[in-house]
Image (cartoon, rainbow, N blue to C red):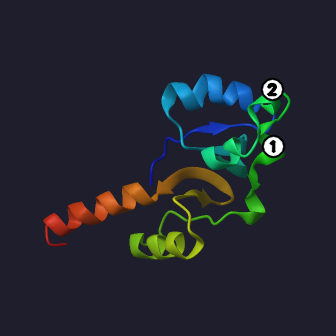
Amino acid sequence: MAREFPATTQQVSISQLVRDHILVQGWRYVIVVNGVKLDGMLTVRSIKSVPMRHWNSTLVGDIMTPSNQLQTAHPQQLAATLLEQMDQFRIDGMPVLEDGNVTGVVTRDALVHLGKTRAEFGV
């Protein structure tokens, strides 16, 4: 689990998010928060579904996937279980919640890397 993750609020325009973060830092997803509470998640695929001419007038909250439609993880969840869940729902990342607060994010790439490293050590 990565404790640092790309985050924004619902009130940011898609144009601002793309200009200030997606293109500068290469974010592929964004966790949408209200303080430390999960509001939703936004992916590059969701952003690309909106015509560019509407990016200034479209807010993150307008196109994010709301938290009640997201798959989430908990800090003690096993890597194998997380990968199964990601495969089942065809997703590449999940917010990690503890007591309803976002504490991190887990991605498919990180889990695959962990598996390779463990295999190298025979664990």
State left or right for residue 107 relative to residue 89: left
Crowding at mark 2 (Cα within 10 Å: few <14, some 14-19, many 20+): few
Residue at x 64% of width, y 29% of height: 18
Crowding at mark 1 (Cα within 10 Å: few <14, some 14-19, many 20+): many
Which of the image's four quarters has the C terminus? bottom left
On the image, the x and y values in percent for residue 42 come to 67, 47
Q: Which residue is mark 2?
A: 56
Q: Are marks 1 and 2 in contact (CB under 8 Å)?
A: no
Where residue 61 is drawn, which disc sits there? 1
Residue at x 63% of width, y 49% of height: 45
Q: How many marks?
A: 2
Of the numbered discs 1 and 2, the one sitting upstream in the chain is: 2
On the image, the x and y values in percent for residue 121 come to 13, 66
Residue at x 22% of width, y 60% of height: 117
Q: Residue furthest left?
A: 121
- Residue 92 vs residue 5, the one in the foreground: 92
| SS at mark 1 in the image | helix
Residue 90's image quarter? Answer: bottom right
On the image, the x and y values in percent for residue 81 come to 46, 76
| SS at mark 2 in the image | loop
On the image, the x and y values in percent for residue 104 come to 53, 50
Which of the image's four quarters has the N terminus? bottom left
Residue 54's image quarter? Answer: top right
Spatial separation of the CA atoms under disc 1 and disc 2: 13 Å
Residue at x 49% of width, y 41% of height: 4
State left or right for residue 53 relative to residue 97: right
Specify the amino acid type for callout 2. Asn
Specify the amino acid type for callout 1. Gly
- Residue 28 vs residue 8, the one in the foreground: 28
State left or right for residue 104 relative to residue 121: right
